[in-house]
Amino acid sequence: MMVQSSTDVDILEDERQQQLSIDHYSVKVIRREQEDVVTQLSIELAGYRKTDMYATTIELTGCTQWYGSENMCNLLADHSYELFHSNGGGISSSSSDGLIYHPNPIRMIELGSGMGRAGLMAIKLMLYEGCRDATCILSDGEDEVVALLENNYHRNFGTEHTLTTADAGCYSNTPSLSCSCLKLVWGDEEVLRGLLEEFPSGFDLIIGCDLIYGSDALSKLQALVYTVSMLLARREEDVATPIGEAHDSTAAATKAVFAVRSRPSFFFAVTRRDLSFFSGEAFELLLQRHALTARCYLDEYTFDIFDNQVDLTSMFWRDTIVVITRVQLGVV
């Protein structure tokens, strides 16, 4: 067996670095108080450029970009106030508009971050909305991808892991956000225990983009759902809404979906695959075993990549974002 010398490894690493491309991604945010004020937030990412739709020349899919993260970034930007602002929405049946204010600091983790497009944009949005004492963890299961993820974090936020709102060019220099990059293989009990020791109440918001694909999709999904069930925070307000119910388009109902500090949620962007198993009974049963429910698909973020026609029966090659929450005990 041939063993690579350190020089060989260095040369190989240099060649890999030369293949990295630098791209810029941005979102537009409309201020809640001033709808005519639009701010553009941008991040810079290093990764490998795909030469075909399936990235067949790239060994690790997390080292390149996929559409699911774009869809997720748009969602996070569109609803950054409800998700991240200290006065963002909560749910209350007693208030006139169904909203209460939640000063509680938000805890967020991204699973399968890859290059970090969605997670890093979430950090930008948290800072923009003036978060206080919030936490954002970006994770992936591959060492090489985590190294690339950390590189992209430093590229956008420097070496500090405690950020202030001034880092986003707004508000004050108040410490507001603790960030870290972590290796997390779904289902890894040791890492999950460590996270829950540090954050015993769990995470209000979990996001994941384009995570399930390939011949072992089912086993990946099982490990993913278990990981979500371990990390998602528990709240007394959790309510099960069976998938497929008619969507309430009122403003209060829309805000309710994003009031994650009242109803912790997993926002799961699924993309460009045959995802028919998501609409089947097996998926619902898998969630039920872990006391989870697919609350809804977000229509505004649902597309067909060929002609933008949505096939609700097969969901063949369908882009969408699924909102998964805990089932409230005693609710059928």
Image (cartoon, rainbow, N blue to C red):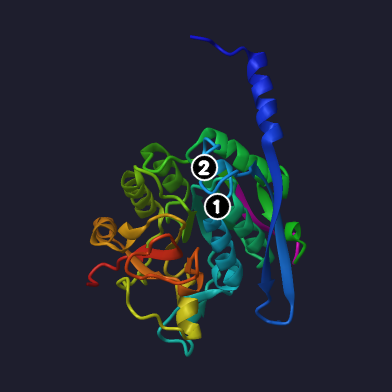
Instruction: Look at the image and say whether residue 173 sits in the magenta stretch.
Output: yes
Residue 186 at least partly seen: yes
Whole-angstrom CA distance, mark 1 to mark 2, is: 9 Å
Q: Residue at x 38, y 56 (%)?
A: 274
In the rendered view, would you say 110 is above or below 143?
below
Residue 181 location in percent, x, y? Answer: 57, 43
Q: Which residues are magenta?
A: 171-179
Name the disc covering residue 61, or none. 2
In the rendered view, would you say 93 is above or below 260?
below
Name the disc covering residue 66, or none. 1
Is there CB contact under 8 Å for labels 1 and 2? yes
Q: Residue at x 69, y 32 (%)?
A: 17
Could you tell me the amino acid type at mark 1? Trp
Q: Residue at x 29, y 68 (%)?
A: 328
Residue 86 at least partly seen: no
Q: Residues within 10 Å of mark 2 (few under 14, many from 20)?
A: some
Nearer-the-camera pick, 6 or 18 = 18
Residue 58 location in percent, x, y? Answer: 55, 37
